[in-house]
Image (cartoon, rainbow, N blue to C red):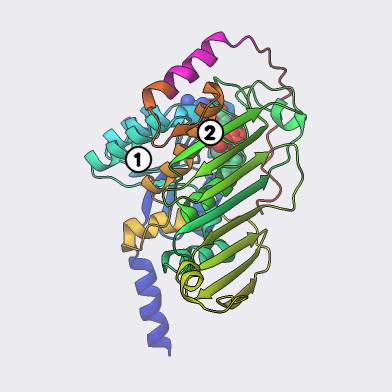
């Protein structure tokens, strides 16, 4: 027994720890630093970086690690082999590219960037420099989402006939006023689709795939901000299926839901509940062949009532580390983070143009639209600083 324990201890000691720094130690970065230290045995926190030196020093002191005021200094120090980037997203591109070029692995907060063209560059660079790029989509680890992904990946849904995504993401004006970068074209490059809804949008596109075209409509309805707090769109899929997309920071939860109807089954996710109906045989074959006037394919129901879980970012961090140290499957690769951004940029572009757009969108056209919005912005933002992590992240 004692021998077994000693061998186990020895094996645990042998696990290599990925030397990791956190860049941007505000609400999320501070939390990630804590996760690395307390919940990811395959990582070692070696430094923290923040443009606000006071903040960096506060966090550095807490975790007893060196502090840098920018990522270039961190790179020069040679202390880290991996970084977690948690700065505002329009800053992700430069930091990410510099770290990748310095041969560091990068786990980047969502969204990878505010434009799909920037995110493309990040994915391409990681491939070129042979380092790993990951994206912080922690909701993929929730039991209901993991099960839904398993059902879809097994091909049980068939061809898409219809989809719905509803994502209420309520936020107060005080939330928007808490930081100078929030809800501005310059600081975020978008509103609810860019910052609050990306997780549900990610789940939606991981499950349903991307549509071939969208007709989008964005508005600012309830908040004093210059970007959208409401977005809706109709979607068209390659086999003739259609979809409806809605998100806003004006509506309260509960009610986050995704419905995907295929010709072989129907998947319904609402909050933490998942329901799947499997059809035997598939609807088109049955419809054509049956001689029964009121016939219906056999419907087999599977219901999964999962307990609501807290959002746990450390799952993504740990999987990223274990991928690098132990070759575990990478659940949130940077490349897999492109789809949600492609969809949100497409909805935005369609709304700017007032007509349907096809996917993949023209990167050049989207970048030009965003540049135009940034240049002509006259919005005067009132900032009442507050730094508190979302209380739903326990
Ligand atoms: N995965 C999630 O659930 C989740 C939740 C909230 C926010 N986020 C994302 O995390 C990122 C940060 O959001 P936040 O709420 O923590 O913001 P925040 O404002 O609380 O923190 C950002 C920090 O970055 C620092 N910073 C700014 N520019 C920098 C630079 N050039 N170099 C180093 N540090 C710099 C700021 O001083 C600040 O401390 C955003 O991309 C956001 O979309 C993800």
Viewer-nearest residue: 186 or 291? 291
State which region is magenta: 366-378
Image location (x, y in percent) of residue 230? 67, 33
Q: Residue at x 42, y 67 (%)?
A: 155
Q: Which residue is mark 2?
A: 347
Asked whether 373 falls inside the magenta stretch, the response is yes
Image location (x, y in percent) of residue 54? 58, 27
Image: 196 above or below 262: above
SS of the residue under disc 2:
helix
Image: 186 above or below 167: above
Viewer-nearest residue: 213 or 100? 213
Image: 156 above or below 102: below
Task: Inspect this view and state whether residue 65 appears.
Answer: yes
Q: Which residue is mark 1?
A: 79
Foreground tag (2 vs 1): 2
Task: Inspect this view and state whether residue 26 appears.
Answer: no
């Amino acid at each position: 027994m004692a021998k077994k324990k000693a061998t186990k201890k020895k094996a645990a000691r042998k696990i290599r720890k990925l030397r990791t720094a956190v860049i941007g130690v505000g609400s999320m970065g501070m939390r990630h630093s804590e996760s690395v230290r307390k919940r990811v045995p395959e990582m070692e926190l070696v430094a923290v970086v923040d443009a606000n030196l006071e903040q960096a020093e506060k966090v550095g002191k807490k975790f007893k690690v060196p502090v840098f005021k920018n990522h270039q200094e961190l790179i020069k120090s040679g202390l880290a082999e991996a970084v977690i980037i948690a700065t505002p997203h329009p800053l992700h591109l430069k930091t990410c590219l510099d770290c990748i070029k310095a041969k560091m692995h990068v786990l980047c907060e969502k969204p990878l960037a505010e434009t799909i063209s920037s995110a493309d560059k990040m994915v391409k660079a990681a491939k070129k420099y042979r380092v790993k790029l990951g994206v912080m989509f922690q909701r993929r680890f929730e039991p209901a989402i993991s099960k839904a992904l398993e059902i879809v990946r097994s091909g049980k849904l068939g061809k898409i006939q219809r989809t719905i995504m509803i994502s209420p993401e309520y936020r107060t004006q005080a939330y928007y006023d808490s930081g100078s970068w929030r809800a501005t074209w310059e600081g975020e490059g978008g509103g609810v689709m860019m910052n609050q809804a990306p997780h549900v949008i990610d789940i939606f596109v991981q499950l349903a795939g991307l549509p071939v075209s969208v007709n989008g409509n964005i508005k600012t309805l309830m908040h004093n901000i210059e970007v959208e707090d409401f977005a809706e769109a109709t979607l068209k899929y390659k086999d003739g299926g259609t979809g409806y997309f809605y998100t806003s920071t004006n509506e309260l939860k509960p009610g986050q839901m995704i419905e995907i109807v295929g010709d072989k089954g129907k998947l319904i996710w609402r909050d933490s509940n998942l329901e799947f109906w499997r059809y035997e045989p598939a609807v088109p074959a049955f419809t054509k062949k049956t001689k029964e006037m009121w016939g219906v394919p056999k419907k087999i129901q599977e219901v999964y009532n999962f307990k609501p879980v807290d959002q746990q970012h450390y799952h993504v961090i740990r999987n990223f580390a274990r991928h690098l140290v132990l070759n575990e499957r990478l659940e949130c690769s940077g490349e897999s983070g492109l789809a949600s951004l492609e969809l949100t940029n497409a909805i935005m572009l369609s709304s700017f143009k007032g007509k349907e757009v096809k996917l993949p969108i023209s990167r050049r056209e989207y970048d030009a639209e965003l540049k135009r919005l940034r240049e002509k912005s006259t919005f005067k933002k009132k900032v009442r600083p507050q730094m508190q992590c979302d209380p739903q992240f326990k």
